[in-house]
Image (cartoon, rainbow, N blue to C red):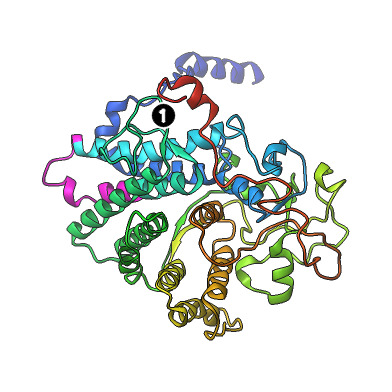
Amino acid sequence: MRTRAAAVVALLLAGCDTSVTNPGLTPDEQLDKPAAWPAVVVGARRALSDAIGSSAGPVSQLLYWGAAVTFEINPAGSTGSYGIPTDVQAGLPTDATMNGDWTQSNVARYAAEAAVARFRRVMPDTLFPKSLFVAQAYLYAGFANRLLGENFCQSVIPVEVPNPTHYVLAPGNLGSHTLYFLRADTAFTNALAVFTATGKTDTQTVNFIRAAHAGRAAVRADLASYGLAPWADATADAALVPDTAKFLAPYSAASPDQYNYLYWARANQSFRAHTEWGTFYEDYYRRTRDPRVRWDTTTKSDTLGDAAVAKFGGRVPFWPEAKYATTSAPVRLSSGWEMRLIEAEAALVGGDVATAVTKMNLRRTNLALPLYDPAITLDSAWTLLKLERAIEFWLEARRIGDLRRWIANNTPGAYVDGTYRASYPGTLSPTPIETMTTPVARALCFPVGRNERETNPNVP
């Protein structure tokens, strides 16, 4: 019987071709087919998420590095394996450290803009102006350009409009970061035009339209800060976005290269690489329980980070952020509450303290937090606005852009930052031992990646 069974197996194997052929990469022309268009758009969205922070190659940690430079987190672990490099800890990341972040951020921009170009080439002329695929690609192009403008020091995109205010005309020079805001404005404007032309009013399309208005409001506020656009343009968009609206960049638990990078770096599974210990947000949450900056207070007080931190002289308490609780936790790209803060900032530019405080109090009412007194000085109101933006956009890759535009343009009011001497239980010392300006001035933007400098003949 055993011999007969073996013979049957041998015959079956002889009659089956068990070889496997790897078809290789998908030919580019296959992406021109309508069946592939959803994947093209999802690819642009995925590239944006990767740029914000994931371990997909080239690895980008833009949210993570920005949070470390601006004291939204403190290092609590190694400098590798999801840790924070020493140059980032010092607040001065090099162009070598930023290679992956620069590359992936530009991949996100290119993936979305190339998707638009592909659709323009292969779609019928009657379909392109009202295709949801086109509108979504424009939307992701807008957010990718905003990410570059708010986080990187300069642009390397060739001149498109002969306006020396925004572009560097001479070859061999880098352009202003405000170029990305202009590109984002155009992308969001195009997205709105196409979404509107679809004639669709379903919930998903309405959410996309609100996201485009919110994204455009944000970049117009950025441009207004530099005197390159009127604040009225930003508030006109903001007014069209309700308080509860939000638009998210998704992540997935399917594999580590699709994880939310910031969460995984502190997940306490393999890594305890960063902590809220010693930050402004540690003490602020202890005092207020403001859910926007929640960190895990249930962690035992004697739990330490996964390695010694030289700048702190040893291992530090591991009190992790709790904004992102899973590997698939999304990162918010825009929201209605951001719009209320844009309206508040515009009011302060016009000297209207009462309106600005009223706008800020809308969110605090929503969270059942104590309200601000509108009977304050203009300078104090600016300080509150900067505080509210620090809290509202905590760990969303927005902080470094805010600090840069306020400091560069001598905006009134103080801002919070710094590493504080901490004790537990208790509160932080009132004076930070390290800030954005002491003992050295920390970076207010990230440099162009070294690979770009070494391979692009137009970049010095």
Would you say residue 274 is visible in this rendering?
A: yes
Residue at x 18%, y 45% (from the top left corner): 128
Residue at x 22%, y 62% (from the top left corner): 200
| Magenta region, main secondary structure | helix
| Disc 1 crowd, CA 10 A, few/some/many (<14, 14-19, 20+) | some
The magenta region covers 121-139
The furthest residue to the left: 126
> Where residue 156 sits: x, y (%)?
40, 33
Residue 134 magenta: yes
Q: Secondary structure at mark 1?
A: loop
Between 256 and 273, the one nearer to me in the picture: 273
**207 to 374, vertically: above or below:** above
> Where residue 95 sits: x, y (%)?
58, 31
Indicate the amino acid at tag 1: Asn
Residue at x 43%, y 80% (from the top left corner): 355
Q: Is residue 304 left or right of residue 139?
A: right
Between 235 and 285, the one nearer to me in the picture: 235
Between 453 and 139, the one nearer to me in the picture: 453
Residue at x 33%, y 72% (from the top left corner): 239
Say which residue label 1 marks: 173
Q: Is residue 133 left or right of residue 434?
A: left
Image quadrant for the N terminus? top right
> Where residue 455 sits: x, y (%)?
47, 20
What is the quadrant of residue 87 in the picture? top right
Residue 275 magenta: no
What is the quadrant of residue 47 in the picture? top left
Between 25 and 162, the one nearer to me in the picture: 162
Q: Is residue 391 left or right of residue 318?
A: left
